[in-house]
Amino acid sequence: MTKQPPNTMMSDVTTQGIRVGAAAFYLPDRSDPDDHQFVFGYNIVIANVGDAPATLLTRHWIIIDAHGVREEVRGEGVIGQTPRLEPGQAFKYQSFCPLRTPWGTMEGQYTMRRDDGQYFDAKIGRFYLAQTQAAEVERD
């Protein structure tokens, strides 16, 4: 049986008025499949669709490759920034993720803080990183 990733290259989740959209794409020019190096880019849009400002403080990513190897990445902000979003505002950024397999998944959360000091985690829904040129991804 051949396992292939679902055709879910994007996610869109809203938590307490913070909407996080994510979309992935394969970067063939930065990858070397013969050396098991696959690099994927992803675009993130964080939009405040609620009625109260919020500031992004930290990120937590869970990355799982096609073999089930799990890696967690935590850090302050995103791309060196901690954006504060007023209602109706959005913040967009692009980053990348290297994998040792031709597909995997990413999901996680952003820790957010309201002006009144309330903290909450804005969920980043699972999305797939997939080398679209691969006909057979992984054998059982």
Image (spheres, rainbow, N blue to C red):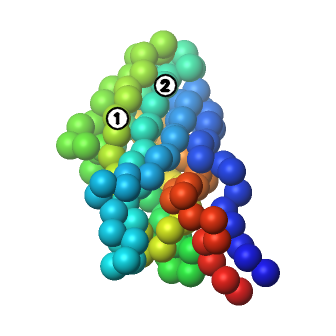
Image vertical order of residue 68 relative to residue 105, above or below? below
* Whether residue 74 is visible: no
Mark 1 secondary-structure assignment: strand
Q: Position of residue 57 (x, y in %)?
A: 33, 43
Q: Quadrant of residue 140?
A: bottom right
Name the residue beneath numbered marker 2: 47
Q: Is residue 126 left or right of residue 57?
A: right
Q: Is residue 83 above or below residue 75?
A: above
Q: CA distance from mark 2 to mark 1?
A: 12 Å
Question: Residue 92: percent from the left, percent from the top?
Answer: 38, 29
Please tell me whether mark 2 or mark 1 is closer to you in this view: 1
At label 2, the amino acid type is Ala
Q: Residue at x 44, y 52 (%)?
A: 26
Task: Please state, as top left, top right, bottom left or bottom right, where the N terminus lies in the image.
Answer: bottom right
How many marks are shown on the rendered structure?
2
| Depth check, front residue: 110 or 114 | 110
On residue 115, which mark appears? none
Quadrant of the rendered structure where residue 39 is? bottom left
* Mark linked to residue 93: 1
Residue 135 pos. (x, y %): 63, 65
Amino acid under disc 1: Tyr
* Outermost residue, top side: 88
Q: Is residue 134 shown left or right of residue 7?
A: left
